[in-house]
Structure formats: C-alpha cells, structure tokens
Image (cartoon, rainbow, N blue to C red):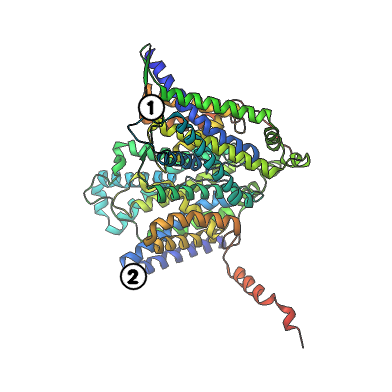
Amino acid sequence: MPALAKRVGIAVLIIGVLAGVGPLLESVLTEYAMRIIILCGISIILAVGLNLINGTTGQFSIGHAGFMAVGAYGTAYTVIMLEDHAGAFLSSLPEEVAHGGVLIAGLSVGALVAGVAGLLVGAPSLRLRGDYLAIVTLGFGEIIRLVFNNASALGGPTGYDGGRPAGLPAYTNFFWVYACAAAVIAVVASLTFSRFGRALSAIREDELAAEAMGIPTTRLKVTAFIISAMTAGVAGGLFAHLQSSIRPDDFKFDKSIDVIVMIIVGGLGSISGAALGAVVVVVALELLRDAQEYRLILYPLLLILLMILRPKGILGRHELSISYLRNLFSKKTATPPTTTEAP
Amino acid sequence: MQVFFQHLVYGLSSGSVYALIALGYTMVYGVLGLINFAHSEVFMMGAYAGLYCALGLGYQPDTPFPLVNALVVLLFAMMAAAALGVTIERLAYRPVRHAPRLTPLITAIGVSLLLQNLGILFFSATPKPFPRIVAETVFHVGGVVVTNVKLVIFGVSIALMLGLQWFVFRTWTGKAMRATSVNPAAARLMGVNVNRVIGSTFALGSALAAAGGILFGLDQTTVSPQMGVMIGLKAFVAAVLGGIGNIPGAVIGGIVIGLAEEFTSGYLSSEYRDAITFVILIAVLLFRPQGLLGVVRQEKV
C-alpha cells in the first residue's frame, strides 16, 4: 500500500509541475520554441514506444508511422464526432475541462484503434521467427496510406480537417503532451523492469532458449507489439491536434525511419536513451532544416556509420541515472592510476 | 475470355520482372540470412544506368535504335549494378556481418535510404521518360493485344533465369554458393572462399535487378528514384511466397504476384492493385510461412 501511495504521490507531483511549468514556458518562450518542445515530447512517446519492441524485444518494426497515422485519424475523428454530437453538454462544462476531456477520449480511441491494427499486423508475422515483422510493417506503412488516401470520409489525399474551416481544434499543448509522455514512460518502464520485461529480453537474446524456458514467445511478442502500436497511436493523436489538418503523407516511411534513428542514437534497449535520442534528433533536424537535401544524404549515412562504429548508441542498454553517471565519472578518473602512484 | 487472356499477357510480363528482382532477394537471403533492403534501390539505379547509357549511345526518340545498342544498354546496366551491389556488400554489410541480427538489418535500411536520396539528388525526384530502346509493334492474336515489348520482357526474363539456373547448378561458383547457403562454416572448411561467394551472389542478384529495371522502364515508359520502394516490396513478397532462399520459388512467386495484381486490377478495382500483394503476404505468413516450394527445417540447438 505505501508503494501505491508513493506512486500516486509522484503522479500528482508530475501533473502539478507540468501544469505549472506549461503556462510559465508559454509566457517566456516564442511560439516556435514551444512547438519544438512539444514535438520533442511527441517524439519521446514515439521513441519510448518503439524501443519496447525494437530494443527490448529485439523484433524489427519499421512501420511506426503507420500506427501513428491510425492513431491520428482515430483521435481526430473521435474528437470531431464528440463535439458535433455532444456539443451542448460540452459547452456546459468549463472550457479547459471540456477540451481536455474530449482530447483524452479521442486519444483513448486512437490508441485502441492503433492497438487493433497492431494485433492484425503483429499476430501473423510474430508467430514466426525471423525478420518477417520488418517486411510486414514496411508493407503496412505503405498500405495504410493507400487506405487513407482512398477514404473519402476522412478527406482522402487532401487530408482530414474535421470539415471545419478552422481545421482540427488545437488541443495539444505542453501539459497534455508531457503528461502523456510521462504516462507512456511509466507504463513502458514498469513493464520493462518486470517479469514481463525480462521475458522480452530473453526473447531478444535467444528466442529458442526463451521458449525452452517456458516463455510463451508469440504471445509476449504480440503483446509488446500491441503496446508499442498503442503508444504510437497516442503520439499520432497528439500530433493531429497540433496540426490544423492531417494528411496521409504526414505519415510517410521517413517518419518511421526518424523514430528508428532516435532509438539507435539513444541506445537500443534503454528507455532514457530513447527519450534522449528523441530530443537529440528533433533538435538536430530543426537545426539542419536549412540544409534539407543534404540532410537526406547525411541522415542515412549517419545511420550506416553508427551501425558499423557504435551500434549501441549513446547510452547502450544503460539507463540514465545518478549511479550510471557516477560510475561513468569515477571510471574516467580512476582509469589512469599508474601514473599517480609514484611517491 | 478475350479479357482474361489480355490480363494474362500483362500479368506474365510484369510478373517476370518481379521474378527477376525476387531472385536477388532470395539469393542474398540464402547466403547471408539478410533482407537486403537496398536491393530495390539497386534495381532503380540499374534502370537509370540503362537510361543514361542509351542517351550516351545517341538514342533519339524518333529514329530506330539498333538492336545491338539495346543489348549494350542492358549489359552496361547489369555490369554497373553488379559493381554497385558488390560495393554495398563490401563497404556496408561485411563490417556488420557477425553483429547481432538487428544491426545488418538497420544498415540495409540505411543503404536503401542513402541510395534513394542520392538518386533524388542526382536524377531529381521527377520521373524521367525511359528511352524506348525497343521499337513497339502491336500484334492482334485472336482479339488479344500483344506488343513485342511485352514479348521481349518475358523472353529476356526467361533467358536470364535459365542462365542463372545453369550458373547455380552447373558451375563451380554456383556449387559453392549452394554450399554456403546450407552451411557457411562447413563450406569454408571445404575450401570455399565465403567472402568471394557472397560477393558473386551480390553481383549476380544486382545484375538481374538491373535487367529488371530496364525491362520495367520499357514497360512503364518512365523511371523515378522512388520506383524501387513498391516494386521491391512486391518482389520481396514474391520471394517469401515462393519460399525465401529458394531460386525456382522466387520465379514462381514473381509470376503469381504479377498475375494476381493484374487480375485484381482487371476484375476488382485498380485501387486494390497494391493491396493484393500485402494480402498475399499475410496469407502466406498465416498458412504457409515456408512458402510454396520451401521446406520446414527443424531448428536445432
């Protein structure tokens, strides 16, 4: 019971801090800087979610943007439906509550739909050992854009704006993005450092041995994949309400690659590494914005070189913690002892 | 019936192009166990090599292009792609060959993106008209429209596949290739230079992909740096359908995908053209993951 109380306390503390920091940042920073910070938050959700399947479980998904798209359309559609059909009830509530409530409802539906898509994609491909998930998710990412391009109810190729002249309502703000990021990190972390997470690592290290130890590999792989898809759905929903409209082309293959680069830069298998990688990549992409065409060359080149020279990324599988930093620091100072030992 | 045969002709010609590309995927998977994502970009680069070679040989849109020149274009593209394939293997894949499973896969994605973006930088993202290096003549066979281009595509593909079959089963390098795909360590003990075999696998697969690129360009009349993505995906599905690692399987898979696509767009709707491949992939994974010609191998610890 004290553990639960402690967790609730931490959650309340985080919500309080976010609620306080959000308006403060908004008053100090420019709109542009604020947008980058929000994009960082969305990318953290994407990276931490993908890391669960690619880093911890060792399965290779390259269609994260596809699930993001499903979540984005699911969320936006739900929000518009709720506001169109329950407008009278919503307007009786205080504005903040109404907007937040609608967004949360939308995100829940977005995550759910993305999770179902994850089940449909994951179940056939994860039954098998090998790299089938890579090719199926690649195909899924392409097909899902085709589906949205042909879905006239969702705007087709021109995009979905809810049929409103002002576009989708801009409910995504600092508070909601980082509250969702905190929730996603909490869920993924508690899964990773549990029996479930250790089983996932066992699958990554040796699937055959894991199965011999009695781990139901298919079920766990599919579960991890569904959770990963759901987090992508949440990120997609938040992204949708940052834009005035969403188009199928917002969720191209490049977006999936962005997320893969984030988790590789940060260190495959590390949650804090994924979050760090997300921030590094978003900021780096923003700085490279002027050099667009070279960015497209540099980016894959960096990916290849990283794989050859430092495949474990910045943090490797370590988590960023005080003890890790202390170890790092003490190792650096303790390594050259021979020279100092002279009298 | 007439409509049926019409689709059959179209399906066989596009299917044989898929088969050519699928062979490269399946061969590399056979020896390395790696999905070579860059293969679709080798296919694209091969098509561009052919395009520039034809222009270099003085191709003019309105004057007939000599047959010898068309053959030169094909051979040049195949050689250029083979060189590209070997370079990719040497520079990007060999350093990570013994790394954990994910590392080579991510490297392959990186190489694929790099080549695609280099293509956009050098050739521009807008599609280019592909030279009609074979002048088109139309025949009517019992109401079915058949062009000599379709026949050339089908004929060249079949000839190349027969050539490959001869190479793999009748030459020493082919034997070494088969040995490596069964067991690289044992092959090395028997005196096979595994590095060389892997190199020649990449060279062969890439050359076939380039031939596929030329034939695709002839068929579709335009080429673009992004054309590899969807075609590569379909060819890979063809390889999985036939049984990955299995050479005749890749050919059958390619033809089946080509026909399925053509009949879907003919009898259902052309919007589902790309989706049918994906449906086939899921169906194969669910019902026959080893593919049509694959055998289930018991995994041993």
Q: Is residue B85 visible?
A: yes
Q: Residue at x 44, y 42 (%)?
A: A141
**Where is residue B47 drawn, in percent x and y?**
45, 38
- Amino acid at circle 1: Ala
Instruction: Tell whether B92 sits left or right of A141.
Output: right
Image height of A309 relative to A210, above or below: below
- Amino acid at circle 2: Leu
Instruction: Tell whether B100 sits left or right of B150.
Output: right
Q: Which residue is mark 2?
A: A29
Q: What chain is tagged by disc 1?
A: B
Pointer 2 local density, CA inside 10 Å: few below 14, some 14–19, many at least 20? few
Of residues A209 and A180, the one nearer the viewer is A209
State which quarter of the image contains the N terminus of chain B. Answer: top left
**Where is residue A53 drawn, in percent x and y?**
55, 48
**Where is residue A25 drawn, in percent x and y?**
35, 69
Q: Is residue A129 visible?
A: no
Q: Residue at x 42, y 32 (%)?
A: B275
Q: Which residue is mark 1?
A: B135
Image height of A202 relative to A117, above or below: below
Give me the C-alpha separation between circle 2 and circle 1. 64 Å
The number of numbered discs placed on residues in the rendered structure image is: 2
Give the SS element for disc 1: loop
